[in-house]
């Protein structure tokens, strides 16, 4: 295959982990006889500084014309501390999602046996947890009508039938490839938008008789996720609930530096780590590149290149087993490895495999 990849390193630790993702992508392509071209593009604070727009038109065109986007992170403290800032790096992310029609955000929660002790949950609760959250990404409050004056403000949680149907169908497709259990998460006891979600889910469910569908209110789902994370296989939910639940899910594994994600929809798919830009660590060679590297595994798997994805996952597991780890997950007294060193070890493993 020939891959045309748009690379968006973004801000903070973004460029450092991006480089490791690119190196792993290249090594795997070489091994399996694929060719790959990279086109770099600006986004986030880096793009605001350069051209005044967090997702410039040029970046959009590069993404649109690519087979996949390898995205890293956006965000900079100089915007966080300035509530009057007119443009923010995060707007670039939202613009990218909307313009590429990335309505389905897939966030897996997996555990790594050797890191279970880092989980905030007891080992016996979290061991073996393995689920994915499918978050609707281009609707709801994030994009609905908004208003703000000095004394009153609102955000509208609007959803249409086609928006709900397509994300539910995506979720069922994932459930069919996994343990065939789908949990539809909503707040149908209070919200009209959730009642429409549940109504449509109940209409669609009979089309997937092989999948066991259940319904859960979001407050209950938040609780269940920490009481019994193994309960879940695939959960699907609207944009805002998904934002909150996936942060909760991401820490269950012990380090959010390990979790990748995919956003797919109408145009080019985007693969990115779940974590943010960690500006305090920028340039220090301490950020964990594994989430970015596992995003490359998700990229290959999206294109049905299963062996390529598996090799990356094996390499990551081997690096953890060999204690070639960045400081936040290193065992006490273990040697220190930086972002580059972990990336280089994994590339080496792939070459020798
Ligand atoms: C995420 C992030 C974004 C979101 C922010 C950075 C706008 O929290 O991808 O989950 O809220 O969607
Ligand atoms: Mg979030």
Image: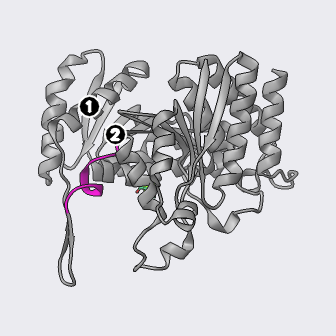
Quarter for ligand 1?
A: bottom left
Q: Is ligand 1 less than 8 Å from the beta carbon at label 2?
A: no
* SS of the residue under disc 2: loop
**Front position in the image: 123 or 83:** 83
Q: Is 196 situated left or right of 138 in this image?
A: left
Q: Is residue 279 above or below residue 295?
A: below
Q: Residue 323: percent from the left, percent from the top?
A: 81, 42
Tell me, yes or no, if residue 165 can be seen here.
yes
> What residue is rendered at 29% in x and 53% in y?
219
> What residue is rendered at 56% in x and 30% in y?
299
Q: Of marks 2 and 1, which one's residue comes earlier in the chain?
A: 2
Q: Quadrant of residue 76?
A: bottom right
The numbered disc on residue 166 is 1
Q: Is residue 91 above or below residue 245?
A: below
> What residue is rendered at 70% in x and 24% in y?
29
Range of residues picked out in magenta: 136-145
The numbered disc on residue 103 is 2
Q: Quadrant of residue 266?
A: top left
Q: Is 166 situated left or right of 178 in this image?
A: left
Q: Residue 351: percent from the left, percent from the top?
A: 82, 25
Q: Is residue 144 magenta?
A: yes
* SS of the residue under disc 1: helix
Q: Residue 20: percent from the left, percent from the top?
A: 72, 43
> What residue is rendered at 19% in x and 32% in y?
201
Q: Is residue 291 above or below residue 155?
A: above
């Amino acid at each position: 295959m020939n891959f045309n990849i748009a690379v968006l390193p973004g801000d903070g630790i973004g460029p450092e982990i991006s480089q490791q993702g690119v190196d792993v992508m290249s090594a795997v392509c070489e091994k399996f006889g694929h060719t790959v071209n990279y086109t770099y593009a600006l986004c986030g604070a880096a793009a605001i500084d350069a051209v005044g727009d967090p997702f410039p038109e040029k970046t959009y065109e590069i993404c649109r014309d690519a087979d996949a986007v390898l995205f890293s992170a956006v965000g900079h403290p100089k915007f966080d501390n300035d509530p009057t800032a007119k443009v923010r790096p995060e707007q670039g992310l939202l613009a990218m999602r909307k313009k590429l029609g990335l309505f389905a955000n897939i966030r897996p929660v997996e555990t790594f046996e050797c890191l279970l002790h880092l989980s905030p949950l007891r080992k016996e609760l979290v061991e073996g947890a393995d689920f994915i959250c499918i978050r609707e990404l281009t609707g709801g409050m994030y994009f609905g009508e908004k208003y703000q004056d000095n004394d009153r403000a609102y955000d509208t949680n609007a959803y249409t039938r086609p928006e709900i149907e397509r994300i539910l169908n995506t979720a069922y497709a994932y459930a069919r490839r996994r343990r065939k259990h789908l949990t539809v998460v909503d707040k149908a006891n209070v919200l009209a938008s959730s009642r429409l979600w549940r109504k449509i889910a109940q209409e669609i469910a009979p089309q997937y008789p092989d999948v066991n569908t259940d319904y859960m209110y979001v407050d209950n789902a938040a609780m269940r996720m920490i009481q019994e994370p193994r309960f879940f296989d695939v959960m699907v939910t609207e944009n805002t609930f998904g934002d909150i639940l996936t942060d909760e899910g991401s820490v269950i594994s012990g380090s959010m530096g390990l979790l990748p994600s995919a956003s797919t929809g109408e145009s080019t798919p985007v693969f990115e780590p779940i974590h943010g830009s960690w500006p305090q660590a920028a340039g220090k060679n301490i950020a964990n590149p594994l989430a970015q590297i596992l995003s490359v595994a998700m990229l290959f798997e999206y294109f049905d290149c299963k062996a390529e994805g598996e090799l990356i996952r094996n390499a990551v597991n081997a690096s953890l087993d060999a204690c070639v780890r960045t400081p936040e997950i290193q065992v006490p007294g273990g040697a220190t490895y930086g972002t580059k060193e972990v990336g280089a070890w994994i590339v080496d493993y792939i070459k020798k495999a």
